[in-house]
Image (cartoon, rainbow, N blue to C red):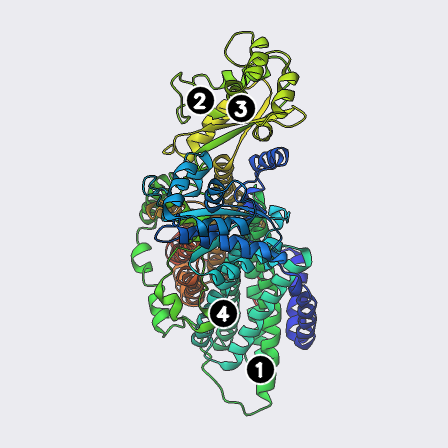
Amino acid sequence: MTGYGERLLDALDTWIVDRPGTVVVVFLLLTAGFATGLGNVTMSSGTEQIAQDVPAYGTYQRMEDDFEFTFEQSDDTTQLIQTGENVLSREGLLRMLETQQRLADREDLRVSDSTSVANLVARELDPDATSLEAQIRTVERASDTEIRTAVRRVSRRSSFALAVSDDFNRREAYASATLAVVHHRVYVESSDVGSGGEATQLSDIQLESRRVTDSVGGDVRVFGNGIISYENSKILQDSLKATIPAVVVLLLLFLALAYRDPFDIALGVVSLAMALVWTFGFMGLVGIPFTQLLVSLPPLLLAIGVDFGVHTINRYREELEAGATDPKLAMGGAVRHLLVAFFLVTGTSVIGFSANLTSGLGMIRDFGLVAAVGIAFDALVFGVFLPAAKLLVERMRAGTRLPAFDSKPLGSEGSVLGRLMPLHLTVTSRAPKLFLIAVLLLAAVGGYHGSGVDSSFEDEDFLPPEELPDYLYALPGPMQPGDYTTTRDVNFIEEHFETSNSDTVTVYVEGPMYRDHALETIVRAGDDPPDSFVTDENNRARSESIVTVIRTYARESPEFARLVAANDANGNGVPDDNLRDIYDALLASPYGDRARSYLTEDYHNARVVYTVEADASRAATTADATEMADRYRFDAVETGGTVVFQRVADTIFATAVTSLGTALILSALFLLLIYYLLLGDPRLSAVTLFPIVVTATLLVGTMRMLDIPFNTLTATILSITVGVGIDYAVHVVHRFVDEVDAQVDPHSAAVVTLRGTGGALAGSMLTTISGAAALYFLSITPLLKQFGLLMTISVTYAFLTSVIVLPVALLLWARKSDAGGAAAPQSQRLPRG
């Protein structure tokens, strides 16, 4: 080790061992400082905050500003979903009108107007019935025959089909469900909806609207962005309320088994709490919101903290068993060993998690940053505070008559774990090269199979299933999930109503649309379209644009038709000259509002909405939309819900691949440097990373086998695998080299390593997978369940490769490095306490 490194290690060792009280006070003061940030932590949920990081979403936002429509649900509207035996009967119509009336009467709900089938029917019965009161009186006085006749008449209108369920029977004037829209005088930016985990104006309005509709009677449900935002935040909170207590209980049980000493258990709990306060206080101080991705972080940090704690206490006990005469000497020896290992583990783990900073999605970058900082905090708390606090406790014990407890280390020679851990060496060490070749082949098969893992970004990932497992409702009261209506209502609308925007993509055209032939470029772009685009009888893409509005109005207005014909050079119904005059006349017509939805009032930007095949894949549709946009003579960009979600999915896949590559490369460089400086043998970096690569390839193969795609959370699993896997591997490598350095033959060094460090790793592994399993079983959303399952698998693979594959690779390394102890020049070997 370098002289500087020796001096730093000596300084830390002296500080911890000789001045433990000062160390404890400093850490308590730091905890108080970080605690001031806890009150600033806000919650953020939903898919829009993720989508806004891709360029296609920025294009959609510009288009939204130009044409005054929204990405999904309108930010200032509430949908009323009415169901019943027949919502078009007198009783059904009156119930909807009464609901609209009560909502309008509440000034705090800021209702500007509302639209429903009941309004249409009432106006058909009496055109002068313009107010809700008048419409209610009209329907009350009408006979059943008059109502059925009015329903048949309004059913011819295009808006009617979108507002009634697909079981509508025109002859019987029957439908089992209908939709109404209520407009509010609020304008909330979509990025602000639900921020901070508190209801926004729209959330408040829609939650209160729900209470109002319940008072009417019948089955009228409230649905909208406010409800979605509120429930997304509630799901996030409920997931935390269920998983964190479960993880804490599991950790306490494990600490009881690992430490078997109430004082050590108390120290472990205090250290875990301190690490969490530091991490979340840091989030509040720097303004990082708590998202659904970060729900996985507390169990992860707690598990890694327990890992560090078990290694600290276990190594201290080993030093006592090895003959250390007092706690100070034992802790001094343990600290000098573990600080080097903790430095290696923390450095590589931080690199692994920080690799997520390469992601194009801000939420994943935040996850990588907070996870990296949290790991560093874990290392400080458990590598410095815990040993100092442990020494203070031991000093207190020495001066009292407190009872002694079992202080044998995990994996001691006579224990069951100590006998099992090195058992495989009797077989694998006989033909190490053959064994490692078999492992490489298995990894290659896993990697090849896993190369087909898909990427996905869906609203459904963030929403709970319509029916939650019964066991979640058997949890203690505060841990039970709430009642969520979003998934139910989304599914109901998709199943029973026509959805006009689900199978379309949009091309946003930026350019002077008043130039001659500007409209011809829209028409020509649709000739011979790609496969995923729906075509008409002339093999042109079926679309809606300003050209559609021009042609429609020309069929109804002879005067406008003459204006179009006078400026139509090729007779295809599309004007080529004097386009400003054409637009002026169109915007002044009854079709002006419709025209403004496709052309800006300055005649500079336009949008073209193409219909695409419902069964076409999102990736194919997006690729075809890009091809269509490239056909335009102006600047044109493909966008829309399908394109935005596919772009996010593409970014997610890139995140998974890039973060894995970055984590492996930077970890290799870090280990290369450190092993060269400490041991003079950089080959150990390859040995250390070997089980990590095997784990990653097996994991992606398992993902494909289980049909789990890369999504916003599982995209981080590979870099997490590197971080956790290196944690395990470095501990094994460090202990093995340490034992070889003590003139122990390589095979015996491997046995001692597996009994001591391997035993501690077994406990750490069980703790981590317990936390991950809690995420899987107690989380509400599919996103967190998938992540919990993959974390369980990843940690298991990392443990098995570290205690089965890695020791064999180390034996080969030791043999090539003169196994008798010449693994490195004596001056460069790791220090011993």
The label number, if any, that marks residue 310 in the structure image = 4
* Nearest to N terminus: mark 4 or mark 1: 4
Q: Which residue is mark 2?
A: 541
Please name the residue that numbered disc 3 is placed on. 549
Residue 557, image x and y in percent? 54, 19
Q: Residue at 47% across / 74% down in the picture?
A: 252
Residue sticking out furthest to the top: 569
Q: Residues within 10 Å of mark 1 (few under 14, many from 20)?
A: some
Neighbor class of circle 3 (other Cα within 10 Å; few <14, some 14-19, many 20+) is some
Quarter of the image with the C terminus in it: bottom right
Q: Amino acid at mark 1?
A: Glu
Residue neighbourhood size for the residue with mark 4, other residues' Cα within 10 Å, grouped as few (<14), some (14–19), many (≥20): many
Residue 566 versus residue 16: which sits nearer the camera?
566
Q: Nearer the viewer, mark 4 or mark 1?
A: 4
In the picture, the quarter occupied by the N terminus is: bottom right
Alpha-carbon span between mark 4 and mark 1: 17 Å
Disc with the residue nearer the chain's start (4 vs 3)? 4
Amino acid type for the residue under numbered disc 4 = Val
Do residues under tags 4 and 1 come within 8 Å of each other at their CB atoms?
no
> Is the residue under label 1 in contact with that under label 3 (CB below 8 Å)?
no
Q: Is 527 rendered above or below residue 65?
A: above
Tell me the amino acid under the disc marked 2.
Ala
How far across and how far down the image is residue 273, in percent? 57, 70
Q: CA distance from mark 3 to mark 2?
A: 16 Å
User: Reading the chain from its start, which is encountered first: label 3 or label 2?
Assistant: 2
Identify the residue at image location x=40%, y=17%. 539
